[in-house]
Image (tube, helix red, strand yellow):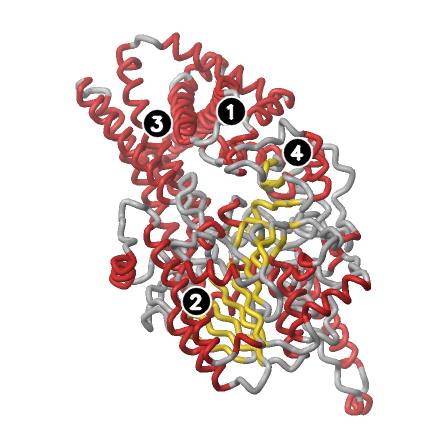
C-alpha cells in the first residue's frame, strides 16, 4: 500500500475522530468549574493538541484494522468465496470479547456476588453478550452504510442528529450521575459517547464524500493531523509543554484529564515494557524526573520514638489525674466539620463543644472509613499495619471491657476490610431487611441511631461497676440517600427542614436526627452519674462531597469538606476550650491511652500526640506533619500533607504525579492551586511528602521482591507478593523434607520427629514492616458494581 493510498484511507476516519475529540475538549471546558490562574487559550491549544494526537492514533489503529480485514477477506475469497462475509463479524466478535473481559470480571467481583454461581457464570456470559453485540453492530453497519449512501440528505441528517443525541445522553450520564466513582464505567460511557458522536459526524461528512466535494480538504486535514501527531509522539518537549499547560486538569479529571492519564500510562509502558510497574509507579518515576527530589526513602523520623519533656509529662499527668477513666466514643460516620459546627442544625453537638476541648481544625487520615479508622485506633499513619499499642489493645491490657454498638451493614463491611477493629463484645443493630443482598457498605434503609443510644445506656447501667471503653458507631448519616423515605420526611416536617429544593436536605435532616440522639445519650449518661468519670470523644471519620464539582459521596478527593472533621474531647475536671491548632485523628489513641491506663501508657511510639498538650502553654511544636489519603476502590489515588506551622496543604494525585498546593487561609482553600505562585514551598513540602509512610515506593528491602504497591487495577500489592513468595518457600521446604523422609530407612522413619508446621504466610496488613518502604493495599474484597461499589 503506497503513501497516497494510505492517505486516502485515513482521510475519512481521521477528520471524524479529530472532530469528536474537539467536541470532548469543548464539553470538558464547559464542565470545568475551576479556571483560577489558568490561561484558557493555552489550555485550549494544549487540549486540542492532545485530543488531535489521540484521535489520529485511534484513526490509524482503525485503518490498520480495516487493512487487516481487507487482507483476510482476500485470503478467504481465494479459499472459499462463502467465507469472505464472515470475516468482519468474526474479527468484531474477537475484539468485543477482548475489550469486555476486564469489565466483565469487575462487575462480578463484589462481596455479595462472589459467593454465588454468578461469580463463575457471569463474566463469560457478559463477555459473550458484548462480543455478540460487537459482531452484530459490525454486520449492521456493513448493511446500513451502503443504504445511507442512497437515502436523501434529510434522512441522513436526521440519523446524524439521533446519533449525536445519544452521544449527549452518554455524556450526561458520565459527567452527572457517576462522577469519579467507577473508572471502568466512565470508560464505557465515554466510548459509547465517542461511538455515537463518530457515527453522527460521519453521516454528515458522508454527504460531502457522496458528492465528491471536499475530498482534497479532508486529505489536507488528515495530513495536518498526522504531522501534529508525529510531532507530539517524537518530541518529548512538546509532550512536556502539553502536560504542564494542562496540569490543572488533574484537579477535575474530566475528558482532558483522562486523556492525560492514558498518555502517561502509554508513555510509561513504552519506555520500559518489561519493567512496567503499573500506572502509579510509572507516575512516581516521572515525579522524580520532573522535580528536584533527593530521595523517596522513608524518613527515619517516622520510626523514631518521640520524647515528651519531663515538665510536660508532669503537667499532662496533673490534667489527666491518676484514676482510670471510662471512655465513650460517639462516632458519626460521614459528618462534615462545617455541618457539625452549625449550632442551629446540631444544637446538642454545639452544647457539647462548649463544655469540651473543641478542636476546630482536626483532620482525618483518609477520606473514607477504611483508611480513617486505622489512624484513629492505631495512632499511626502506617494504615496497613497494626500498631502494637492500638486503642483496643491498651484497653484490654488495662482491664477495660471494650464494647461496640454498630449497625449490621457497617459491621459486615468492617469485619471484612478491617478485621482488627474487633471488640470484646459487639452488638449489632439491624438496619436492613433480612435477605436483602444489595447491601454492602451502602444500601441499608433502617435507622439505628436511636437503638444504639438505648442499648448503650442499658449496657452502661448494667456494667457501671467495671471500667469500659464504649464505641457507638453511628451509621445513619453514611446512608443519608438510602434511609427510609417516610422516616426522613416525617423528621424533616417536625424540624422544618423539608425544603426539597435544597439538594442535601436529607443529609441535613439525618444530621439533625443524630444530634438529637446525642443529646438523649448525654442526658441519660448524666442521669446515671456516668458523666463524672467518663471521657467522651465525639468525632467523625470523614466528610461528604454533597455535590461539589458533581461529586456527592466521599473518598477519592482531599477537599476540606472530606478531610476536615469534628473532634470534641470532654474530660471531667478539665476546663473547656476552643482550640485552633491543627490536629489529626491519629492523636485520639495517644490521648485516650492515658485515660485508660495512666500508670503505664506510653505515647512515644505513636505518630499522634496527646491532645491535652494543647492546654499547656509553650508546649513543644508538633513533631510530625499531618497526612491523609483519598482512594478509589481501595486503591490510593491522592495523598496529602499539612505542616502544622504553615498555611499550606499539599495534595499529590498519584495518577498524574502533579503536586497541588492550596492556601488554607483562603475562604475556599480547594478552589485554587497556588503551586505556580509558591514553587519553593511546594517543592519543600513535596520532598517531605515523598518520605512519609503513605507515599508509594518500590520496596527498598528485598531486591527482586519489589512490585508496584498501588498498581492501576488495585490487585498487585507488595503484601500479595510477600505472601506468595512465603507460600512457595513453604511448599519447597515441605517438598524437600518429604523427599528426605521418603529416603530414610523404615526404622529411622518410624522414630523420626514430626515435621514442624510450616509457618503461616503473613496476613496482608502485617506483612509490611515499618522499614519496608511505603504501603500496599491489603487483600480486600472489591465492592459490588452499582451503588454498593462505592468506597466506604
Image coords of residue 37 (percent x, y): 54, 25
Vertical position of residue 764 compared to residue 504: above or below: below
Q: Which residue is mark 3?
A: 198
Q: CA distance from mark 2 to mark 3?
A: 56 Å
Quarter of the view holding residue 245: top right
In the image, taking residue 770 as reference, residue 180 lies left or right, namely left
Q: Which residue is mark 1?
A: 50
Image coords of residue 382 (percent x, y): 67, 58
Neighbor class of circle 3 (other Cα within 10 Å; few <14, some 14-19, many 20+) is many
- Mark 2 or 4: the one toward you: 2
In the image, taking residue 309 as reference, residue 453 lies left or right, namely left
Image coords of residue 332 (percent x, y): 47, 62
Q: CA distance from mark 3 to mark 4?
A: 31 Å
Residue at (62% x, 37% y) in the render? 657
Q: Which mark is residue 518?
A: 2
- Mark 1 or 3: the one toward you: 1
Q: Which residue is mark 4?
A: 271
Q: CA distance from mark 1 to mark 3?
A: 18 Å
- Mark 1 or 4: the one toward you: 1
Q: Please name whichever residue, 17 or 447, is drawn nearer the observer in this view of the structure.
A: 447
Q: Disc 2, disc 1: CB below 8 Å?
A: no
Amino acid at each position: 500500500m503506497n503513501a497516497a493510498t494510505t492517505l486516502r484511507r485515513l482521510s475519512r476516519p481521521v477528520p471524524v475522530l479529530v472532530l469528536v475529540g474537539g467536541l470532548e475538549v469543548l464539553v470538558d471546558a464547559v464542565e470545568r468549574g475551576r479556571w483560577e490562574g489558568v490561561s484558557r487559550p493555552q489550555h485550549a491549544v494544549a487540549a486540542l493538541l492532545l485530543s488531535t494526537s489521540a484521535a489520529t492514533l485511534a484513526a490509524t489503529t482503525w485503518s490498520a484494522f480495516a487493512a487487516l480485514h481487507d487482507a483476510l477477506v482476500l485470503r478467504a475469497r481465494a479459499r472459499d468465496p462463502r467465507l469472505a462475509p464472515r470475516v468482519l463479524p468474526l474479527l468484531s466478535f474477537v475484539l468485543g470479547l477482548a475489550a469486555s473481559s476486564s469489565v466483565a470480571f469487575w462487575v462480578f467481583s463484589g462481596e455479595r456476588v462472589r459467593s454465588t454461581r454468578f461469580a463463575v457464570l457471569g463474566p463469560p456470559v457478559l463477555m459473550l453478550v458484548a462480543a455478540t453485540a460487537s459482531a452484530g453492530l459490525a454486520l449492521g453497519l456493513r448493511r446500513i452504510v451502503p443504504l445511507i449512501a442512497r437515502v436523501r440528505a434529510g434522512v441522513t441528517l436526521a440519523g446524524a442528529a439521533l446519533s449525536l443525541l445519544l452521544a449527549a445522553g452518554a455524556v450526561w450520564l458520565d459527567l452527572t450521575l457517576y462522577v469519579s466513582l467507577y473508572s471502568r464505567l466512565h470508560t464505557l460511557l465515554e466510548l459509547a459517547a465517542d461511538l455515537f458522536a463518530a457515527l453522527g459526524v460521519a453521516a454528515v461528512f458522508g454527504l460531502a464524500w457522496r458528492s465528491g466535494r471536499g475530498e482534497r480538504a479532508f486529505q489536507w486535514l488528515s495530513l495536518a493531523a498526522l504531522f501534529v501527531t508525529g510531532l507530539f509522539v517524537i518530541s518529548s518537549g512538546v509532550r512536556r509543554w502539553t502536560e504542564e499547560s494542562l496540569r490543572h486538569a488533574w484537579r477535575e479529571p474530566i475528558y482532558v484529564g483522562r486523556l492525560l492519564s492514558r498518555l502517561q500510562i502509554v508513555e510509561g509502558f513504552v519506555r520500559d515494557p518489561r519493567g512496567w510497574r503499573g500506572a502509579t509507579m510509572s507516575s512516581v518515576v516521572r515525579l522524580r524526573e520532573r522535580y528536584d527530589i533527593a530521595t523517596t526513602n522513608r524518613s527515619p523520623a517516622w520510626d523514631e520514638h518521640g520524647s515528651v519533656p519531663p515538665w510536660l509529662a508532669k503537667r499532662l499527668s496533673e490534667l489527666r489525674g491518676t484514676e482510670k477513666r471510662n471512655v465513650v466514643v460517639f462516632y458519626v460516620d460521614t459528618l462534615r466539620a462545617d455541618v457539625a459546627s452549625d449550632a442551629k442544625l446540631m444544637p446538642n453537638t454545639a452544647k457539647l463543644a462548649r463544655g469540651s476541648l473543641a478542636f476546630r481544625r482536626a483532620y482525618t487520615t483518609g477520606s473514607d472509613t477504611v483508611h480513617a479508622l486505622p489512624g484513629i485506633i492505631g495512632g499511626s499513619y502506617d494504615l496497613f499495619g497494626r500498631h502494637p499499642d492500638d486503642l483496643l489493645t491498651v484497653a484490654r491490657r488495662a482491664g477495660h471491657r471494650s464494647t461496640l454498638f454498630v449497625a449490621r451493614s457497617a459491621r459486615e463491611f468492617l469485619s471484612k476490610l478491617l478485621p482488627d477493629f474487633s471488640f470484646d463484645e459487639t452488638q449489632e443493630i439491624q438496619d436492613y431487611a433480612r435477605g436483602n443482598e444489595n447491601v454492602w457498605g451502602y444500601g441499608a434503609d433502617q435507622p439505628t441511631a436511636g437503638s444504639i443510644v438505648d442499648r448503650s445506656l442499658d449496657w452502661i447501667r448494667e456494667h457501671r461497676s467495671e471500667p469500659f471503653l464504649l464505641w457507638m458507631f453511628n451509621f445513619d448519616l453514611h446512608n443519608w440517600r438510602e434511609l427510609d423515605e417516610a422516616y426522613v420526611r416525617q423528621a424533616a416536617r417536625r424540624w422544618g427542614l423539608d425544603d426539597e429544593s435544597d439538594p442535601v436536605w436529607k443529609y441535613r435532616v439525618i444530621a439533625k436526627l443524630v444530634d438529637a440522639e446525642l443529646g438523649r445519650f448525654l442526658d441519660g449518661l448524666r442521669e446515671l452519674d456516668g458523666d463524672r468519670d467518663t471521657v467522651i470523644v465525639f468525632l467523625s471519620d470523614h466528610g461528604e462531597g454533597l455535590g461539589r464539582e458533581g461529586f456527592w459521596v466521599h473518598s477519592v478527593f482531599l477537599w476540606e469538606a472530606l478531610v476536615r472533621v469534628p473532634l470534641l474531647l470532654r474530660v471531667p475536671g478539665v476546663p473547656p476550650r476552643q482550640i485552633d491548632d491543627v490536629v489529626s485523628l491519629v492523636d485520639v489513641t495517644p490521648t485516650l491511652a492515658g485515660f485508660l491506663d495512666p500508670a503505664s501508657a506510653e505515647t512515644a511510639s505513636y505518630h499522634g500526640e496527646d491532645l491535652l498538650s494543647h492546654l499547656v502553654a509553650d508546649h513543644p511544636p508538633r513533631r510530625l506533619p499531618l497526612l491523609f489519603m483519598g482512594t478509589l476502590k481501595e486503591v490510593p489515588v491522592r495523598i496529602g500533607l499539612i505542616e502544622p506551622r504553615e498555611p499550606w496543604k499539599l495534595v499529590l494525585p498519584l495518577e498524574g504525579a502533579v503536586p497541588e498546593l492550596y492556601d488554607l487561609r483562603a475562604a475556599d482553600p480547594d478552589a485554587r492551586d497556588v503551586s505556580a505562585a509558591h514553587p519553593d514551598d511546594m517543592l519543600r513540602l513535596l520532598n517531605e511528602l515523598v518520605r512519609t509512610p503513605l507515599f508509594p515506593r518500590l520496596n527498598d528491602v528485598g531486591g527482586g521482591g519489589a512490585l508496584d504497591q498501588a498498581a492501576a487495577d488495585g490487585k498487585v500489592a507488595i503484601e500479595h507478593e510477600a505472601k506468595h513468595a512465603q507460600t512457595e518457600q513453604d511448599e519447597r521446604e515441605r517438598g524437600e523434607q518429604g523427599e528426605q523422609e521418603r529416603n530414610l530407612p523404615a526404622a529411622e522413619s518410624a522414630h523420626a520427629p514430626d515435621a514442624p508446621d510450616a509457618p503461616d504466610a503473613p496476613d496482608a496488613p502485617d506483612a509490611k514492616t515499618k522499614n519496608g518502604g511505603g504501603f500496599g493495599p491489603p487483600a480486600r474484597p472489591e465492592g459490588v458494581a452499582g451503588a454498593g461499589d462505592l468506597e466506604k
